[in-house]
């Protein structure tokens, strides 16, 4: 297997986490439904939910300041930086050396 | 805010070093020490999370919430001018975290002159990566987070812009149906502390009671909460009691008569003289 540089592994870790996190959520929901003998949602339902939420209109409270608008993006940045720290694609912690 | 160890502020760098050192607990010789390091890292992350939540809430209570009274509204209007002097300090706080590798390098140079070794050579690997104990352990550092976190936020914003539906709409806030002023019913410090107390109700001994007011004419509900202050109850109070009891016993010796004090001094002198042959 080709050895990727650290920065590329980190970028891939973030990309894979962002791309597959909804699928993991869908698999868990599906497994729960199977165990409870329900029909349950589709496997890709979280992706449809995200698409629906992204297309919805944004409504802000009248007195909300700029920080209110920035908060979701800051929150996203915080969560997205977690895969930079913990191994997702690799079996070693943080750095291979 | 730097006390809350938020990246990229100055307080975050020291916490980062501690966390990184604890994460290297797998290098410890025994399983117990490895487990303790892992537990320490988890506890540090947990306390950092609570600290971050608490400080950002307190910051928002003070600076961002709507004013509760007209006096406060006036103070808020005049505050922006007063804050001008704080901006350079805030900038320094951000810079202290961002330029941490250069600070460590400077400290290393100074220590080399005194100690003969340069700790910075083992703490800094890539130009911007800081890692304690052994180099090459980490690939992320406070300086990198300064670059990465805003970049992620920008990516999220662009993603939302690309898929969203134009400008957001402003709508009035629904305030409890009682037509109360928003400033009067907004989050208060207890709104934040109560959930934390409730989650930690076991160790804190949190009790909550809702009852009628003592005055018979009013229908007002009384909401009482109590927290067992563990250190106060189980450590400080017994220690204070012991110290006061010892103090009361010693006080009996203080008669106020000169001859009694001279007797004490004589006893102390005889005791000291008796110690000389024992020590030799």
Image (cartoon, rainbow, N blue to C red):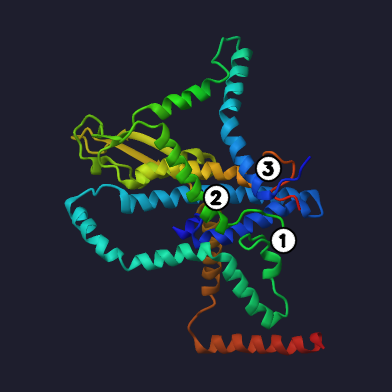
**Residue at the spot x=38%, y=32% of the render?**
B164
Please name whichever residue, A91 or B203, is drawn nearer the observer in this view of the structure.
A91
Residue B244's place in the image compared with A4, above or below, is below
Q: Is residue B56 shown left or right of residue B145?
A: left
Please name whichever residue, B76 or B7, is drawn nearer the observer in this view of the structure.
B7
Circle 1 residue: B135
From the image, which quarter does the C terminus of chain B lie in?
A: bottom right
Percent position (x, y) of residue B224?
A: 36, 40
Residue B273's place in the image compared with A53, above or below, is below
Residue B273's place in the image compared with A20, above or below, is below
Percent position (x, y) of residue B76?
A: 24, 56
Disc ID at residue A87: 3
Disc ID at residue B245: none
**Residue at the spot x=26%, y=60% of the render?**
B80
Numbered disc 3: secondary structure: loop
Circle 2 residue: B47
| Disc 1 and disc 3 in contact, CB within 8 angstroms | no
Residues marked 1 and 2, same chain:
yes
Q: Is residue B229 visible?
A: no
Chain bearing tag 1 is B
Circle nearer the viewer, 1 or 2:
1
How far apart marks 2 and 3 lie (CA) works out to 23 Å
């Amino acid at each position: 297997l080709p050895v990727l540089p650290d920065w590329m592994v980190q970028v891939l870790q973030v990309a894979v986490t962002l791309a597959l996190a909804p699928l993991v959520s869908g698999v868990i929901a599906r497994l729960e439904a199977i165990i409870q003998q329900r029909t349950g949602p589709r496997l890709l339902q979280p992706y449809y939910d995200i698409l629906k939420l992204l297309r919805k209109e944004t409504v802000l409270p009248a007195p909300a300041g700029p920080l209110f608008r920035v908060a979701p993006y800051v929150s996203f940045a915080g969560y997205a930086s977690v895969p930079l720290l913990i191994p997702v694609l690799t079996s070693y912690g943080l750095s291979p050396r | 805010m730097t006390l809350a160890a938020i990246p990229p502020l100055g307080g975050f760098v020291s916490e980062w070093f501690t966390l990184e050192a604890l994460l290297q607990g797998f290098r410890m010789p025994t399983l117990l020490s490895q487990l303790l390091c892992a537990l320490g890292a988890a506890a540090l992350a947990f306390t950092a999370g609570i600290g971050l939540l608490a400080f950002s809430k307190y910051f928002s209570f003070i600076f961002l919430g709507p004013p509760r009274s007209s006096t406060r509204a006036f103070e808020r209007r005049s505050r922006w001018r007063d804050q001008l002097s704080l901006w350079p300090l805030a900038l320094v706080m951000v810079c202290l975290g961002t330029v941490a590798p250069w600070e460590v390098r400077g400290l290393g140079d100074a220590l080399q002159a005194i100690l003969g070794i340069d700790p910075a050579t083992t703490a800094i690997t890539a130009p911007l990566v800081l890692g304690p104990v052994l180099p090459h352990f980490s690939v992320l550092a406070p300086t990198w987070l300064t670059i990465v976190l805003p970049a992620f936020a920008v990516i999220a914003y662009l993603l939302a812009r690309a898929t969203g539906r134009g400008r957001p709409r402003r709508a009035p806030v629904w305030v409890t149906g009682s037509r109360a002023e928003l400033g009067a019913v907004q989050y208060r410090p207890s709104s934040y502390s109560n959930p934390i107390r409730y989650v930690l109700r076991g160790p804190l001994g949190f009790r909550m009671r809702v009852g009628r007011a003592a005055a018979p004419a009013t229908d007002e509900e009384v909401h009482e909460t109590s927290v067992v202050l563990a250190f106060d109850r189980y450590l400080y109070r017994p220690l204070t009691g012991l110290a006061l009891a010892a103090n009361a016993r010693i006080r009996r010796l203080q008669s106020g008569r000169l001859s009694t004090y001279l007797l004490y001094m004589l006893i102390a002198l005889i005791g000291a003289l008796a110690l000389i042959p024992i020590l030799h």
